[in-house]
Image: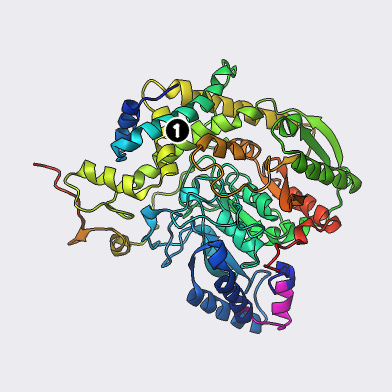
């Protein structure tokens, strides 16, 4: 599987990563070599095999629906790069 | 003091031969003297350390305290530490001061351990050489031109150089065991779910597990004892009792059955490494262990499986870094999309970007079945191989790495060559089983590690075997020249 610079650009867009145009070719070559290594998987016979998402056979644990966390809004806002009047600031979304 | 075991340090503290403040200052002094050459710490926290040491001394003076009270350690910078920078080796989090403690930080604090600082690591734990850290590469105390392994390279270098008696670490594909092998340490990756992941910055959530890097199996047993256990704040934490690891160390090895998988001794294993591992097999046989061949036929597919599963999970986990709530934010973005893209483009290094893109690609429409679903099926085959092996043996043994520590920059621009470093370690993460690396000799003056892989929750047995081996050998007591 070979990725073109154009495909890398598309994947980077999906991942919300800015990649400089002059880096696209380099990334395309490296990602292609990774996918080529990964393509060994195609040879494995897996017709009747259940996919394994997780090493432990466990189900999601439930807990009582009770408030256990204290309110630490101010602490969490203190580490944000830009806040004003208790709100997170982002560039204008609606024109 | 920096060559004593944790047990000896604890006895010294209890007998008042030295105080925790003296012990802590001694290690802080060693960091100040040596770490400019190693770069094993991202942040040193002398004030926090001396305050914890003073509290430990007060506890000890009152006749209280446990086996770890007053003993210093380094925390890998992947664990959130309240009020202390937690960078995860990334520019993205370079100004991130964690608002809460990871569970294991709380537990080790509660056990009376003294945090010296935060250890350097590959960015977001993605790397096998500690060269991807935004804070610069870490050097191997055994040879400053060589890598210490990764991603827990700072933890390993600090402990190997005697800058800390032990360190926490994490292992997603070998990040505890490979650095242990390359720096002559004992490193244990517990069973998936044994140690809480709460407050441990996520890389690949179905693989990540926290563990210990230490200078002996006995030291590792004491620290792991304080870390392990159920945590309701981690939904994948397992609610089953924790064995008494130190108490299990002394069991004789007679009757122990160890499996040797051909796949771990195939082409690619450096002859000098092989002969050290064979020496360990002979020694364990002399100690009473029995050996038989086992087969893990799908093991060679573990690297390709991992490089689908881990990047897929990483691309999802790292989606949280958006430049809005915390972490790096690009200046003067004109739109929200530009803010996301530039913050992430500037904040993540090349290896993290590669893995995010691979993960995004294998999860994208049209490729999901061919890559992600296929990898999950092969993961099951690898898991089944181990299940079959453990029906006839107690442990599986093989080398930890194919080679000794390589030179800095050697695998610079070839990600696949770097990934193949973890060929022997990744299978245990995919299966979820515990695994340990311990020193077993030297090749070209550089340390070699041998790996034990155990059945689920068999940490006590693995530490026991490593301890018995270390009673009969002295490889683990060798110290790097210049750091004795």
Location of residue B135 by image quarter: bottom left
* Residue B18 part of the magenta-drawn span: yes
For image coordinates 28% across by 58% down, the residue present is A80
Res B226 seen here: yes
Instruction: Please provide percent x and percent y for residue A34.
Output: 49, 30
- Up the image or down, B36 lies above or below B17; here it is above
For image coordinates 20% across by 48% down, the residue present is B333
Location of residue B221 by image quarter: bottom right
Asked whether, in this view, residue B36 is left or right of residue B350, the answer is right
Instruction: Please provide percent x and percent y for residue B369.
Output: 45, 21
The one of B71 and A70 positioned closer to us in this rendering: B71
* Region rendered in magenta: B9-20
Which residue extends farthest left? A95
SS for callout 1: helix
Asked whether, in this view, residue B319 is left or right of residue B384, the answer is left
Q: Which colour scheme is used?
A: rainbow
Instruction: Please provide percent x and percent y for residue B11.
Output: 74, 75
Instruction: Please provide percent x and percent y for residue B161.
Output: 65, 64
The one of B362 and B447 positioned closer to us in this rendering: B447
- Up the image or down, B144 lies above or below B177; here it is below
Res B62 seen here: no
* Residue B285 part of the magenta-drawn span: no
Asked whether, in this view, residue B478 is left or right of residue B382, the answer is right
Asked whether, in this view, residue B419 is left or right of residue A31, the answer is right
Q: Could you tell me which chain the residue with mark 1 belongs to?
A: A
Tell me the residue that label 1 is attached to: A30
């Amino acid at each position: 599987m070979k990725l073109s610079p154009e495909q890398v650009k598309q994947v980077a867009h999906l991942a919300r990563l800015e990649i400089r145009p002059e880096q696209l070719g380099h990334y395309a070559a490296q990602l292609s070599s990774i996918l080529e290594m990964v393509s060994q998987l195609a040879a494995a016979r897996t017709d009747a095999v259940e996919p394994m998402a997780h090493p432990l056979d466990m189900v999601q644990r439930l807990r009582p629906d009770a408030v256990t966390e204290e309110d630490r809004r101010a602490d969490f806002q203190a580490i944000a790069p830009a806040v004003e009047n208790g709100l997170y600031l982002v560039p204008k979304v609606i024109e | 003091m920096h060559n004593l075991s944790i047990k000896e340090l604890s006895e010294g503290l209890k007998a008042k031969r030295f105080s925790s403040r003296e012990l802590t200052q001694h290690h802080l002094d060693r960091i100040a003297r040596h770490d400019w050459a190693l770069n094993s710490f991202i942040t040193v926290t002398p004030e926090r350390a001396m305050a914890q040491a003073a509290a430990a001394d007060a506890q000890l003076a009152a006749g209280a305290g446990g086996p770890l009270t007053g003993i210093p350690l380094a925390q890998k910078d992947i664990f959130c530490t309240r009020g202390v920078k937690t960078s995860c080796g990334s520019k993205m989090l370079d100004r991130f001061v964690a608002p809460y403690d990871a569970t294991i930080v709380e537990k080790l604090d509660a056990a009376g351990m003294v945090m010296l600082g935060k250890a350097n690591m590959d960015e977001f734990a993605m790397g096998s050489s500690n060269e991807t850290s935004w804070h610069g590469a870490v050097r191997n105390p055994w040879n400053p031109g060589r890598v210490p392994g990764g991603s827990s390279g700072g933890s390993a270098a600090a402990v190997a150089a005697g800058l800390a008696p032990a360190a926490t670490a994490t292992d997603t594909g070998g990040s505890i065991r490979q650095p242990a092998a390359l720096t002559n340490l004992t490193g244990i990756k517990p069973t998936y779910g044994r140690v809480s992941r709460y407050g441990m910055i996520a890389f690949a959530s179905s693989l990540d597990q926290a563990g210990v890097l230490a200078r002996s199996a006995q030291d590792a047993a004491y620290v792991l004892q304080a870390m392990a256990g159920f945590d309701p704040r981690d939904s994948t934490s397992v609610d089953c009792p924790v064995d008494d690891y130190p108490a299990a160390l002394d069991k004789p090895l007679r009757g122990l059955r160890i499996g040797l998988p051909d796949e771990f001794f195939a082409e690619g294993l450096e002859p000098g490494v092989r002969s050290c591992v064979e020496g360990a097999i002979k020694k364990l046989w002399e100690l009473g262990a029995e050996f038989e061949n086992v087969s893990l036929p799908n093991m060679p597919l573990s690297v390709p499986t991992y490089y689908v599963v881990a990047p897929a999970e990483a691309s999802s986990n790292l989606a949280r870094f958006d430049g809005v709530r915390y972490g790096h934010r690009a200046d003067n973005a004109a739109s929200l999309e530009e803010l996301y893209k530039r913050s992430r483009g500037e904040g993540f290094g090349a290896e993290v970007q590669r893995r995010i893109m691979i993960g995004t690609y294998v999860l994208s429409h049209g490729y999901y079945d061919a890559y992600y679903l296929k990898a999950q099926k092969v993961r099951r085959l690898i898991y089944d191989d181990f299940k079959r092996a453990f029906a006839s043996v107690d442990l599986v043994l093989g080398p930890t790495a194919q080679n000794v520590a390589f030179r800095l920059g050697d695998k610079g621009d070839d990600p696949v060559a770097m990934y193949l470093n973890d060929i022997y370690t990744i299978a245990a993460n995919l299966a979820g089983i515990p695994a340990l690396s311990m020193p077993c000799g030297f090749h070209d003056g550089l340390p070699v590690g041998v790996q034990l892989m155990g059945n689920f929750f068999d940490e006590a047995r693995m530490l026991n075997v490593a301890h018995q081996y270390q009673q009969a050998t002295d490889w683990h007591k060798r110290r790097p020249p210049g750091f004795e």
